[in-house]
Image (cartoon, grey):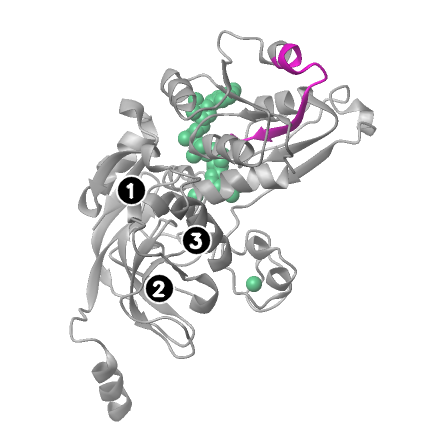
Amino acid sequence: MTTTFAVQEKMLPDTHTATMRATVFHGVDDIRVEEVPRPQAGPGEAVIRVTMTTICGTDLHIVRGEYPVRPGLIIGHEPVGVIEELGLGVSGYKVGDRVLVGAITPCGQCNACLSGKLSQCGHGSGYEAIGGWRFGNTINGAQAEYLLVPNAQANLAKIPDGVSDEQVVLLADIASTGIGGAEAGGVKIGDAVAVFAQGPIGLCAALGAKLMGAAVVIGIDGDDNRIAFARKMGIDVVLDYRVTDVEAEIHHLTGSGVDVAIEALGTQPTFETALRVLRPGGTLSSLGVYSGKLQLPYEAFAAGLGDHRIVTTLCPGGKERMRRLIEMVRRGKLDLRPLLTHRFKLANINEAYKLFGERRDGVMKVAVTP
Ligand SMILES: NC(=O)c1ccc[n+]([C@@H]2O[C@H](COP(=O)([O-])OP(=O)(O)OC[C@H]3O[C@@H](n4cnc5c(N)ncnc54)[C@H](O)[C@@H]3O)[C@@H](O)[C@H]2O)c1
Ligand SMILES: [Zn+2]
Ligand SMILES: [Zn+2]
């Protein structure tokens, strides 16, 4: 026993410290930055030193107790970093490589992964609903100095030289999710697309629809800052639901309704209006996280005979997804840096949560660095 222990100790880099700072969930409205054991990479795993992360709307649901996670868990699921340790069996990488890791970390080997449904990963076999979302949900997450990456071979996406942390940090979740919503909706050249809510997710969905060739993208929100921001980011038409009859206005703008309606909030009213503005045969692509029951009004649904498609998307993850998104950034097709409206040090992440949660000072996303 003693010998094994000594060998393991010797294999650790000289700079290795036993502990690190991390954002730990203790209970509702109680997260603390504290000293915790630093992870070590086992077979197939990697440890990255986190150089930038951010806070997601879903983290707010966790902190408010609306999405339960276990007390003691390190939260956060949007990591950019540098490889610090590589476990046995991870090839093609070296310590010091800069990497982006998606919010969703598929195993790459289960039925779900091998059938292309990586977000519903069954961890080695089968399918598990939401199984691909592990960071800050079922395993320790990214709002920390170091992060253990499971199934590293499937999840480390190298960041090319010349591409900064700021350019890629929002790809891990919001860009992958939002653009994924446009892809799942099957947006085609010439389509009319409506996107309900222009928070970070909805805005990325609208940008995704533009990238995919929509002729017109209509964003809907009711917050002055978000409306102004969506216009600044080039969304064609932005409707303020507080002063506009959204359903009438979209029918006026499009004739028969939109080809694709994207829901990016997770409420009955937005889901229902998305269905009401959809043309017969159109696709409702849903990204929001819902609670309670959702109802489909029969007339908007053409009594079930309207050839509508309703699809849902959990953020696509894995290294190939991240590589593709990084490539869009590197080639100048996608620039999400304007969304990083505020910066915080990890030590002050509680302030960042407060600002982000209250949507103060025009905040869209915050960059958090060690
Ligand atoms: N599917 C996924 O993988 C995934 C990933 C991350 C987040 N989410 C979910 O996506 C949703 C949006 O996330 P976000 O971070 O953009 O949220 P956010 O809270 O930052 O933004 C929500 C926006 O909705 C607007 N809004 C409120 N009521 C509205 C209404 N009736 N009509 C139109 N707009 C309205 C608000 O003004 C705000 O701008 C959340 O439910 C979040 O949990 C899903
Ligand atoms: Zn998220
Ligand atoms: Zn899997």
Horizontal placement of 5 versus 279: left or right? Answer: left
The first of marks 2 and 1 along the sequence is 1
Q: Please tell me whether residue 254 is drawn above or below residue 324 in the rendered image.
A: above
The residue carrying mark 2 is 148
Magenta part of the chain: 250-265
Q: Nearer the viewer, mark 3 or mark 2?
A: 3
Q: Nearer the viewer, mark 2 or mark 1?
A: 2
Locate the N terminus by quadrant: bottom left
| Rendered view: 83 above or below 227 | below
At a point 58% along the width and 43% down the height, the residue shown is 313
Residue pointed to by mark 1: 30
- Quarter location, residue 100: bottom left
Q: Compared with residue 340, is residue 157 higher up or lower down, i.e. above or below?
A: below
Q: Position of residue 224 (x, y in %)?
A: 38, 15
| Mark 3: amino acid | Gly
Q: Name the amino acid type tagged 2.
A: Leu
From the viewer's side, name the closer residue of 94 and 244: 94
Gap in angstroms between the C-alphas marked 3 and 2: 13 Å
Percent across and percent down for residue 130 are 55, 51
Q: Which residue is mark 3?
A: 102
Front residue (pair 189, 23):
189
Residue 208 percent across, percent down from the top left = 52, 36
Q: Secondary structure at mark 3?
A: loop
